[in-house]
Image (tube, coloured by chain):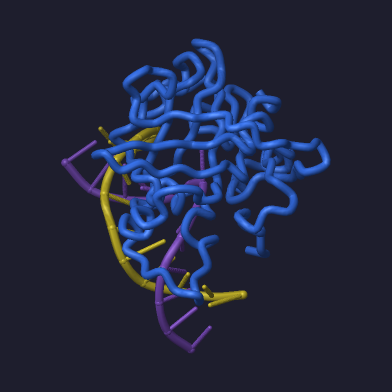
Chain colours: A blue, B purple, C yellow
DNA sequence: CGAAAGATTAGCT
DNA sequence: GCTAATCTTTCGA
């Protein structure tokens, strides 16, 4: 599961809605796993309408709304019945940046480098046009508007950094688990500041 | 049926 | 650095 999270780094996330295609290279991910991860919504294998999709076989999208404002995009990675998921925290915009700016209603200015466009879980989901209606969508379906490509970006083990996850301090000891992975030298990674 | 909290972000001081 | 914005989900009565 942790291996899957690392494997997702440098893969390319593609969305194609309404004949507009946007792509981004994944630069930062976090792993979540039930039943022993308090930070996971399905902690204790608790099945609710919202978490049900995490129990599906890997390859499905799990998108949910946080703080009433932000959509967070996860990839379900576990076998059926296992609530494993990888949260995509940041991507590097590749194609369709003009649509991303339009979706985020942000002006493209030097003051706002592209890193603000897709760095951060809520930000990237909005930039790629993802929202809660897409939860449960299979990324593997031939007609899926969302999928992940391997474009062969080279990844050295030394390029990958690991650390504790962000924003899950409430999870107690589980918050210390080093289940966050990012590309060490990428500017498209949110640097954890003191909170 | 009502209430509380959350895997966050943008904008201002 | 700090705070407001904002709404779905989940749990309790």
| Residue drawn at (31%, 59%) of the image | A102
Q: Please identify the quadrant where the N terminus of chain A is shown.
A: top right
| Residue drawn at (56%, 32%) of the image | A86
| Residue drawn at (44%, 29%) of the image | A147
Rendered position, B1 above or below A92: above
The answer to which quarter of the image holds residue A162 is top right
- The outermost residue toward the right is A158
The answer to which quarter of the image holds residue C12 is top left
Q: Looking at the picture, how far across and down is residue A113, in whole percent?
A: 52, 67
Q: Looking at the picture, how far across and down is residue A92, in whole percent?
A: 55, 50
Rendered position, B9 above or below A79: below
In this image, A142 relative to A3: left or right?
left
Q: Looking at the picture, how far across and down is residue A15, in whole percent?
A: 38, 37
Q: Looking at the picture, how far across and down is residue A39, in whole percent?
A: 58, 37
In this image, A71 relative to A20: left or right?
right
In this image, B12 relative to A129: left or right?
right
Q: How many marks?
A: 0
């Amino acid at each position: 599961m942790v291996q899957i999270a690392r494997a997702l780094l440098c893969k390319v996330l593609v969305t194609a809605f309404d004949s507009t295609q946007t792509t981004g290279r994944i630069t930062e991910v976090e792993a979540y796993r039930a039943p022993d991860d308090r930070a996971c919504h399905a902690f204790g294998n608790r099945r609710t309408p919202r978490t049900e999709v995490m129990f599906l076989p890997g390859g499905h999208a799990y998108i949910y709304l946080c703080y009433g404002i932000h959509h967070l995009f996860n990839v379900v990675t576990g076998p059926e019945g296992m609530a494993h998921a990888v949260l995509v925290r940041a991507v590097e915009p590749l194609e369709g940046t003009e649509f991303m700016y339009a979706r985020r209603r942000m002006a493209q200015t030097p003051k706002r480098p592209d890193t603000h466009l897709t760095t951060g879980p809520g930000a990237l989901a909005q930039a790629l046009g993802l929202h809660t209606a897409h939860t449960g969508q299979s990324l593997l379906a031939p007609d899926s508007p969302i999928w992940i490509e391997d474009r062969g970006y080279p990844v050295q083990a030394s390029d990958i950094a690991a650390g504790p996850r962000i924003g899950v301090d409430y999870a107690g000891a589980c918050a210390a688990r080093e289940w966050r992975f990012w590309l060490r030298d990428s500017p498209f990674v949110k640097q954890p500041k003191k909170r």
